[in-house]
Image: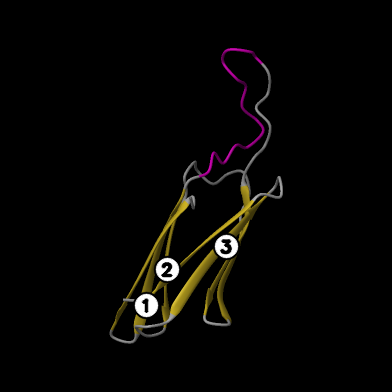
Amino acid sequence: MSSIKLKAAAKDGAVEVKALMTHPMETGQRKDKKTGEMVPAHFIKEIIVTAGDKTILTANWGGSVSKNPYLAFSYAGKAGDKIKLAWTDNKGETDSAETDVA
């Protein structure tokens, strides 16, 4: 099961993309309240969004982004485009989701 909810809708020559990603986004600077140990850093470091074979967005994130991040943006596109969002985190884990623009 993907950790990404991805939606894309076309209107007036623009496509609005909305993505909600489930991820702990730990900074590595927080202590576990029960153990007193530092919680290891675990965050999404790169997001790549493509429409067809064209990269439309690349984002480089760090530990300062909140838990379960939400990303929304628009690009010049049309209904029927296939959108893919993929992320990689600092532990090498990856996930991706695809949707067709409505």
Q: Quadrant of residue 29?
A: top right
Q: Which residue is mark 3?
A: 86
The region drawn magenta spans 23-36
Compare marks 3 and 1 and give the one earlier in the sequence. 1
Q: Which residue is mark 2?
A: 73
The residue most toward the left is 11
Q: CA distance from mark 2 to mark 3?
A: 15 Å
Q: Nearer the viewer, mark 2 or mark 1?
A: 1
Compare marks 2 and 1 and give the one earlier in the sequence. 1
Looking at the picture, does residue 28 appear above or below residue 33?
below
Q: Residue at x 49, y 50 (%)?
A: 3
Magenta portion: prevailing SS class: loop
Q: Nearer the viewer, residue 9 or 98?
A: 98
Q: Residue at x 37, y 76 (%)?
A: 101
Crowd class of label 3 (few under 14; some 14 to 19; many from 20; radius 10 Å):
some
Q: Element at badge 1? A: strand
Q: Residue at x 57, y 62 (%)?
A: 86
- Colour theme: secondary structure
Q: Element at badge 3? A: strand
Left-right relation of 24 to 72: right
Residue 44 at x, y = what percent? 61, 50
Q: Which residue is mark 1?
A: 15
Crowd class of label 1 (few under 14; some 14 to 19; many from 20; radius 10 Å):
many
Inspect the image, locate mark 3, and give the three-letter code of the amino acid beneath it.
Answer: Ala
Q: CA distance from mark 3 to mark 1?
A: 18 Å
Q: Nearer the viewer, residue 69 or 97?
A: 97
Inspect the image, locate mark 1, and give the three-letter code of the amino acid beneath it.
Answer: Val
